[in-house]
Image: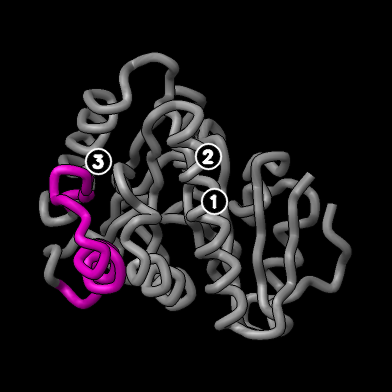
Amino acid sequence: MTRLTTCPDAESVAERAAAHIERTLAQAREERGAAHVALSGGTTPGRTYELLGASGAALDGVEIWFADERCVSPDDEESNYRLARETLLEPAGIAPARVHRMPGEMGPAEGAESYELEMLATLGEEPSPPVLDLVVLGIGPDGHIASLFPGARTLDAGGQAICHGVSDSPKPPPQRITLSLAVLHAARGCLLLATGASKADAVDAMLGAPSRHVPASLLRRERLTVIVDDAAAPSRPGP
C-alpha cells in the first residue's frame, strides 16, 4: 500500500522528505554496502536537496543518478543536473565520480543510449532492469512523473527498457531523457513529493485506478511513499 503523509506546508514536506531520503540511503548502505538514488528537478525536490546538502555525511558513499533530464547543456537554467549541483552536490561535497549525469546535450536518442550503458556498466546487467535504492519524483498537474507523460508510447515499452529519449514532450522543452517505467518499478522505493493546490487533482488521480492517462498511478504502490502538503492533499483516502 502507498504510504501517504500530509504536512502543513511545503517546508515541512521538504524536511520530512530529506529525513526519509537520509534514512533510506543509510539502510541501503548498511544492508548492501552501497546506495544509489535518482533525483528529479522541481521546486519541492530542490528545497529537499538544500536540506540534504547541509548535512553532507548523509550522502557519504552514495551514487547519484537522475530520473530525467531536459536536452540542454548542464549549465542551462532548465537543467535538472544544474539544480542538483547547486543545491546538493556542491554543498555536500559529493565527488564528481559518484555523480551520473544524464548527458542532455547529446540529444534524446544518443543521450538515452549513453545513460543506459552507464547504468549497466555501474549497476550490472543482472537483474534487468538495474535496481536503484530510491527514486525521488515530483508530479505534474497532468499526473506525469520524470518525463513519462500521459498516453506516451514510452509507458508501453516493457520490462526490459531502461532509458528513453523523448522528442515530443507536451511540456517544453520537447526533447528529454527519462528513466523507463520499468526502472521505476524495479527500484526498491520511490518517493513522490507534491506541494500546492495545483497538484491536488493529480495526487487524487494517482491514488485512483492505474491508468496510462495518469502515469504516476502506474507506480508500484507497495514501494511508493508520497509526501504532500495540505494544499496538495487528496480528497480520497490513501489506498
Distance in Å between CA atoms under marks 2 and 1: 6 Å
Given the image, on which type of amino acid does mark 1 rest?
Answer: Arg
The mark found on residue 27 in the picture is 2
Secondary element at tag 2? helix
Given the image, on which type of amino acid does mark 2 rest?
Answer: Gln
Q: Is residue 194 left or right of residue 102?
A: right
- What's drawn in magenta, residue-wise? 76-103
Q: Nearer the viewer, residue 195 or 15?
A: 15
- Taking the view exactly as shown, the residue that stands out farthest to the right is 237
Residue tagged 3: 112
Of the image marks 2 and 3, the number of the one nearer the N terminus: 2
Above or below, 204 relative to 216: below
Distance in Å between CA atoms under marks 3 and 1: 30 Å
Residue at horizontal 43 percent and vertical 76 percent from the top = 47
Secondary element at tag 1? helix
Above or below, 56 relative to 32: below
Q: Is residue 205 left or right of residue 52?
A: right
Secondary element at tag 3? helix
The mark found on residue 146 in the picture is none
Q: Nearer the viewer, mark 2 or mark 3?
A: 2
Residue tagged 1: 23
Magenta region includes residue 144 = no
Image spot of residue 110 (x, y percent): 16, 40
Of the image marks 3 and 1, the number of the one nearer the N terminus: 1
Quadrant showing the N terminus: top right
